Image: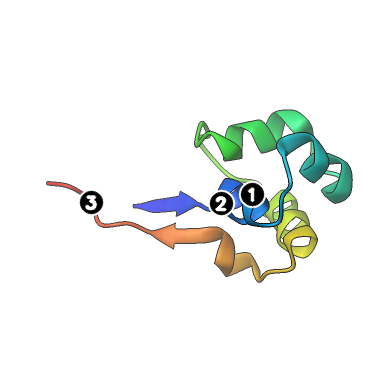
């Protein structure tokens, strides 16, 4: 299972959802979905903008988690 780290990385930089939306150009609605893990799919172009804004690689936005059996 893969988890998005948007919230974690933004908070480390002192950014809230609104600030991240303004700086990245990604809609606040989409950031809210990523922030709260409420998505069925991800948009690579939006993730690329978020990675650039957060100063990380695209792959850094993802964290693999072990699935609980």
Residue highlighted by disc 3: 67
The front one of 30 and 45 is: 30
Left or right, residue 57 beside residue 68: right
Q: Which numbered disc flags the more N-terminal residue, 2 or 3?
A: 2
Q: Report x, y in % for residue 40.
A: 50, 35
Q: Is residue 60 left or right of residue 3?
A: right
Q: Quadrant of residue 32?
A: top right
Q: Is residue 49 above or below residue 41?
A: below
Q: Residues within 10 Å of mark 2 (few under 14, many from 20)?
A: few
Q: From the image, tell me which residue sits under label 2.
A: 8
At a point 61% along the width and 56% down the height, the residue shown is 9
Residue behind mark 1: 11
Category of crowding for the residue at label 1, using alpha-carbon neighbours closer than 10 angstroms: few (below 14), some (14–19), many (at least 20): few
Alpha-carbon distance for marks 1 and 2? 5 Å
Q: CA distance from mark 2 to mark 3?
A: 20 Å
Taking the spot 59% from the left edge, 38% from the top edge, the residue there is: 35
Numbered disc 3: secondary structure: loop
Residue 69: percent from the left, percent from the top? 12, 46
């Amino acid at each position: 299972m893969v988890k998005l780290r948007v919230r974690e990385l933004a908070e480390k930089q002192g950014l809230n959802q609104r600030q991240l939306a303004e700086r990245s150009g990604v809609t606040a609605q989409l950031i809210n979905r990523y922030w709260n893990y409420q998505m069925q799919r991800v948009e690579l172009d939006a993730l690329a903008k978020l990675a650039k804004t957060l100063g990380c690689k695209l792959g850094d936005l993802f964290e693999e988690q072990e699935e609980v059996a």
